[in-house]
Image (spheres, rainbow, N blue to C red):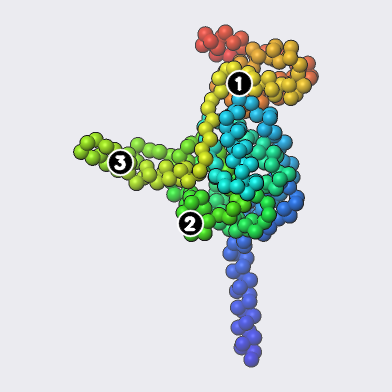
């Protein structure tokens, strides 16, 4: 009898060690703590953490992306109201409002039960478990992946591909995936991928398997929304919007246009992000009375670098 007791004790000790090593399934957080959550790995286990200070971005604050705004808002409204809706891939120029648009939609529909869970691409292998965790909830969940792209062989690629469309167990009706990326096909496209392409006698081109594989993930998003670089007019309109937000009057906004263009030239980009950064800087200096020295815009046009 003593031998049996010792054997049981040793087995329990071994199980305790294994439990410490093996990943534990993510536990449900306090869903009332926030409207946005982050999924993070802590050792071998996943944790869903509430976001304590959610960004207050609103849809009407986003300028010069009206078409993109209408498409994402419509899809999100369908989802929140229990109607058919698509997973969404937002692609295009950096700093043009892709992430901001998703956050604004969250604020727009949070009162109607919309919630957001941000997941890093490194943790996408746990996506099936995360979907199962929220499947029975009454809220509607957006799984949000920001700046998504993959290198060859990354495990999260297969997990995302399966959960979008392809696994036996489909995602529940209360989950959609919204992802942003600067790359439409999400995987690097290399010259060597074209070596497997075949040609018929009449010159028809058939892409190789590598090319087909790289296109297949993005095709599983039902809705593509593209963003484009801003023109000078659009950039200045966004600058004006942010300067009004920071309390400048119309005369001050008009006077800041020249400096805003120089700021964009220095950054090499006319984007919404650059406009916001300029407005923060300019408004802060206006309040403390500082007057910055800057290179005249004519020097940039003539190709003279700043001193």
Mark 1 highlights which residue?
A: 235
Secondary structure beneath disc 2? loop
Mark 2 highlights which residue?
A: 167
For the point 64% across and 89% down, the residue is 2
For the point 65% across and 46% down, the residue is 81
Give the farthest residue toward the right.
Answer: 288
Q: Position of residue 228 (x, y in %)?
A: 53, 27
Q: Is residue 233 above or below residue 36?
A: above
The crowding category of the residue bearing disc 2, from other C-alpha atoms within 10 Å (few below 14, some 14 to 19, many at least 20), is few
Secondary structure beneath disc 1? helix
Mark 2 or 1 closer to N-term? 2
Mark 3 highlights which residue?
A: 206
For the point 68% across and 30% down, the residue is 60
Give the farthest residue toward the left.
Answer: 201
Q: Position of residue 23 (x, y in %)?
A: 59, 62
Circle on res. 64: none
Q: CA distance from mark 2 to mark 3?
A: 27 Å
Secondary structure beneath disc 3? strand
Q: Is residue 219 above or below residue 155?
A: above
Q: Is residue 102 above or below residue 167?
A: above
Nearer to us: label 3 or label 1: 3
For the point 75% across and 24% down, the residue is 246
Q: CA distance from mark 3 to mark 1?
A: 41 Å
Q: CA distance from mark 2 to mark 1?
A: 43 Å
Q: Position of residue 204 (x, y in %)?
A: 27, 37
The crowding category of the residue bearing disc 1, from other C-alpha atoms within 10 Å (few below 14, some 14 to 19, many at least 20), is many
């Amino acid at each position: 009898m003593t031998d049996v007791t010792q054997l049981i004790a040793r087995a329990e000790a071994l199980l305790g060690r294994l439990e410490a090593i093996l990943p534990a399934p993510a536990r449900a957080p306090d869903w009332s703590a926030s409207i946005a959550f982050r999924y993070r790995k802590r050792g071998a286990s996943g944790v869903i953490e509430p976001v304590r200070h959610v960004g207050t971005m609103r849809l009407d604050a986003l300028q010069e992306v009206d078409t993109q705004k209408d498409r994402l808002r419509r899809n999100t409204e369908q989802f929140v109201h229990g109607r058919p809706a698509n997973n969404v891939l937002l692609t295009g120029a950096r700093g043009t409002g892709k992430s901001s648009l998703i956050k604004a939609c969250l604020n727009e529909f949070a009162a109607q039960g919309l919630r957001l869970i941000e997941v890093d691409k490194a943790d996408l292998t746990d996506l099936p478990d995360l979907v199962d965790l929220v499947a029975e909830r009454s809220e509607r969940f957006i799984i949000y992946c920001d700046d998504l792209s993959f290198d060859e062989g990354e495990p999260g690629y297969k997990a995302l591909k399966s959960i979008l469309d392809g696994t036996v167990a489909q995602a529940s009706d209360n989950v959609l995936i919204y992802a942003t990326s600067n790359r439409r096909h999400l995987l690097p496209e290399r010259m060597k991928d074209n070596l497997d392409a075949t040609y018929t006698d009449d010159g028809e081109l058939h892409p190789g398997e590598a090319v087909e594989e790289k296109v297949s993930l993005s095709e599983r998003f039902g809705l593509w929304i593209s963003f484009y670089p801003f023109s000078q007019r659009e950039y200045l309109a966004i600058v004006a919007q942010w300067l009004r937000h920071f309390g400048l009057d119309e005369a001050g906004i008009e006077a800041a246009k020249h400096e805003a263009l120089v700021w964009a030239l220095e950054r090499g980009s006319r984007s919404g992000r650059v406009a916001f950064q300029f407005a923060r800087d300019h408004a802060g200096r206006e309040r403390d009375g500082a007057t910055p020295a800057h290179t005249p815009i004519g020097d940039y046009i003539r190709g003279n670098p700043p001193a």
